[in-house]
Image: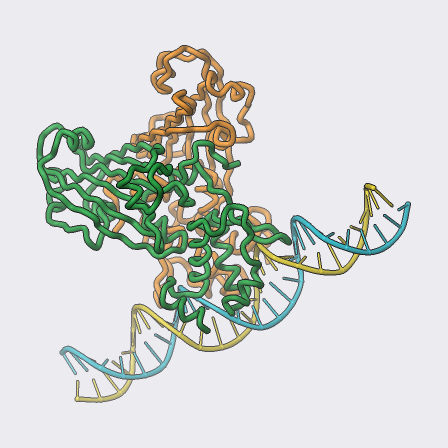
Chain colours: A orange, B green, C cyan, D yellow
Amino acid sequence: MSLIETAAVEGGGSLHQRILSDISEKILSGAWAPGHRIPFEHELTAEYNCSRMTVNKALSQLAKAGLIERRRRSGSFVRRPQSQAAVLEIHDIRIEVEALGLPYRYERLARLKRRSSAEDRALLELTGAGPVLALECLHFAGQRPFAHEQRLINLTAVVEAGEEEFLDIAPGPWLIGRVPWSEAEHRIRAIAADQHIADALDIEPGAPCLVVERRTWSAEHPVTQVRFTYAADSHTLVARFRPSQG
Amino acid sequence: MSLIETAAVEGGGSLHQRILSDISEKILSGAWAPGHRIPFEHELTAEYNCSRMTVNKALSQLAKAGLIERRRRSGSFVRRPQSQAAVLEIHDIRIEVEALGLPYRYERLARLKRRSSAEDRALLELTGAGPVLALECLHFAGQRPFAHEQRLINLTAVVEAGEEEFLDIAPGPWLIGRVPWSEAEHRIRAIAADQHIADALDIEPGAPCLVVERRTWSAEHPVTQVRFTYAADSHTLVARFRPSQG
DNA sequence: CGTTTCAATATGTATATACATAATCGCTAT
DNA sequence: ATAGCGATTATGTATATACATATTGAAACG
């Protein structure tokens, strides 16, 4: 059947993954708003030409991930975004994206090695004036931009980062694999998207965004400062000021 | 069969939940150290007297949660704790615990309403000298203490908290359900357990612990300050300074 | 008219079965 | 001895089936 063929092209491979992926995409894109009733298992069974167990596996995982709510006799419904709990789940973006059943893609937008400016030193809490590496990256969930990353790496602390292009691997995972860390500080807040962020995330300027800034130290040395920006309408990363969770 | 009966008594209800719960308990308690090979599916099938699909469901979920790693032909193995990613997953403790397949339990240790001391004002970044509510709680995963919570609530900002006993509901969920928040600040670090924490978490004094402190503001007003302390040997909340994740 | 009961329905869990896939072990042939 | 090959093994995915359970809606009844 054609659906299965397209699944093999795009999805994670298995059919239930493909179903999961299709549905999360609909929810995250807003096509299916909160409260919307998802097709019944027997309908999806017909649509994907598979058994109910396969559909059930996909829907159960969606329920477990908090994207949908299942009610006996009534069906399955798109949940309203959870706020507080969700906000702090953002960390390893690849894992977060893949947990939603969406294909993850990473793209490096810019890379610049330079002597640290005053601003750089303020962001990194650097005392000396060594070189830094400035990076700008995008993380995708399926077709949609998921997070914008703006990062400074202290090249005095992480010399080998100066030789890395970060074209195929995101700086987060790269650093985790190499640099011991002893402390991290986070700041989480909401902003209105400026033009640059709006372009990057494919949203309207002024739209609410969630910003997570993280500074990491390793044995008293500042290692990196990173600022992740997420569009507020992405499910797990909501900049709702009034938490809706019960 | 007797195993099924005991499952009905303790576990979440379904058999695969029970299997999942049993195995996570073994891993989190340290009985099965990282690298340990857990029984093959067909062995668990015999042990629990159920089909392979049921065992498979439990093991797949454990793999997805990152507790174990599955290798074809070789078996399933307890994974080393992941560090970075895991550290930031801690937030809604109930959800975290239940994701591991363990029964969650909450216990309030102490509750004290008082005029804010100088220390309270520093912690909350309070300017005025209004009343605060000080709470001390414990969160359990199965039989084991999972997290120790020490919290201050600004009763000027959240008047109704003064009437709540917090015997049956943890302050976190309670606040999320009532108080709009606009900003949160986190600090994550490792400490050695003092006597008090060691007693609470049932670990040795001096053992490494992960501490997460969070301050929350709502429209410029400090709402609450909370300090979670986790034993480092709990899997998802590891105070490893040298991230082992690849 | 209100309440109770019952059947229909969608999800929740479990089974036996089947075949695919990847990794390892051991045998064989060079 | 060793490189290659095939058999074995454990997991990965999917199917058809069965029964449990919760909830809804409608029919039956007081």
Residue B192 screen position, x and y as percent: 34, 35
Of the pair A193 and A56, the residue shown nearer to us: A56
Q: Nearer the viewer, residue A116 or A101?
A: A116
Residue A225 x, y percent position in the rendering = 39, 24
Q: Is residue A107 visible?
A: no
Q: Quadrant of residue B118?
A: top left
In the image, residue B224 sits, relative to residue A133, either above or below, namely below
Residue A84 visible here:
yes
Image position of B134 (left or right of A87): left
Q: Is residue B83 left or right of residue C2?
A: right
- Image coordinates of residue B107 in percent, x first then y, are 24, 52
Residue at the spot 31% in from the left edge and 30% down from the top edge = A187
Task: Give the residue drawn at x 14%, y 46%.
Answer: B161
Q: Nearer the viewer, residue A242 or B37?
A: B37
Give how far across and how far down residue B62 sits, in percent.
48, 53
In percent of the image, x 27 and y 52: which residue is there? B106
Q: Residue at x 46, y 23 (%)?
A: A135
The residue lying toward the viewer, choosing from A147 and D26, is A147
Which of the image's four quarters has the N terminus of chain A? bottom right
